[in-house]
Amino acid sequence: MFQRAEQLLGTDAMKRIGAQRVIIFGVGGVGSWCAEALVRTGIQHLTLVDFDRVDVSNINRQLMATSQTVGQVKVDVLRERLLAINPNADITALPILFNEESAPSFRLEDYDYIIDAIDSLKDKALLIEQACQIKARFFSSMGAALKLDPTRVQVAEFWKVKGDPLARALRNRFKKQQRFPKRKFKCVFSDESPQQVGEVKGSLVQITAVFGMTLASLVIQDITSSK
């Protein structure tokens, strides 16, 4: 199943990839594609966190959203999809909203990698704070909505992200509350100016999928670069 990946990365690297425990918060337009890329590259232990159900408006950009899955729990549908790729994978689906009340139940210290693809500013800030207090490697997605050019998607340390309104809002929140992440972390973002059309934050799979794939790439690169 992973022969082509092993030919590129090596046997030892694939063993390390298979041993890692990864949790993804938010499996929408960004997180769903990240999950698929990770499982197809050999991640065996993956936890999916999202309280939402598939809506017809998700079909244009979310991996598991089809006309047949509308109304179903997102993490359950995505888990089924991922197990169809690798039936031996350990995929946990948690249909829970990550917030102040639920945060202690996730035991973030049990994971090697934490991936943030949350939309809510408040909950995203909370996850960033908590993830940066433990040893797990942490990667975060900034805003993928209102963008058209996938070639503008890039990676930078959080405080060096430019041109992204979500990153700016997060930094302002941390400064106002005088509560800062305990360590640096990498973000996937686009420096393209938002294409504001009305009040709805439209988004395209050509952008969200690139965000998700880039997050997955950060995880795989980090695993394979460590000895």
Image (cartoon, rainbow, N blue to C red):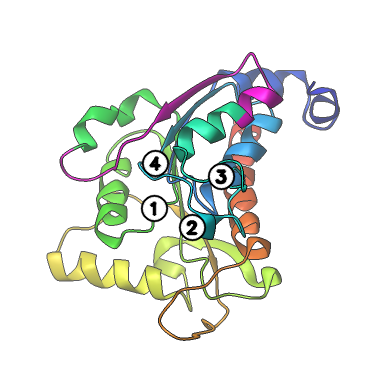
Mark 2 against mark 4, which lies toward the viewer?
4
Q: Real-space Cα distance between discs 1 and 2?
A: 13 Å
Given the current orientation, which residue lies at the most extreme top position? Answer: 88
Query: Which amino acid type is marked by label 3?
Result: Ser
Q: Real-space Cα distance between discs 3 and 2?
A: 17 Å
Q: Mark 2 points at which residue?
A: 187
In the rendered structure, find residue 118 and report the number of the disc placed on it: 1
181 left or right, relative to 212 = left
Figure quadrant of the C terminus: top right
Position in image of residue 58 (x %, y %): 53, 56
Task: Establish if 23 lies above or below 120.
Answer: above
Range drawn in magenta: 81-101
What is the number of callouts on the image? 4
The residue carrying pointer 3 sits among few (fewer than 14), some (14 to 19) or many (20 or more) residues within 10 Å by Cα, namely: many
Q: Real-space Cα distance between discs 1 and 3?
A: 12 Å
Q: In which quarter of the image is residue 39?
A: top right
Q: Real-space Cα distance between discs 3 and 4?
A: 10 Å
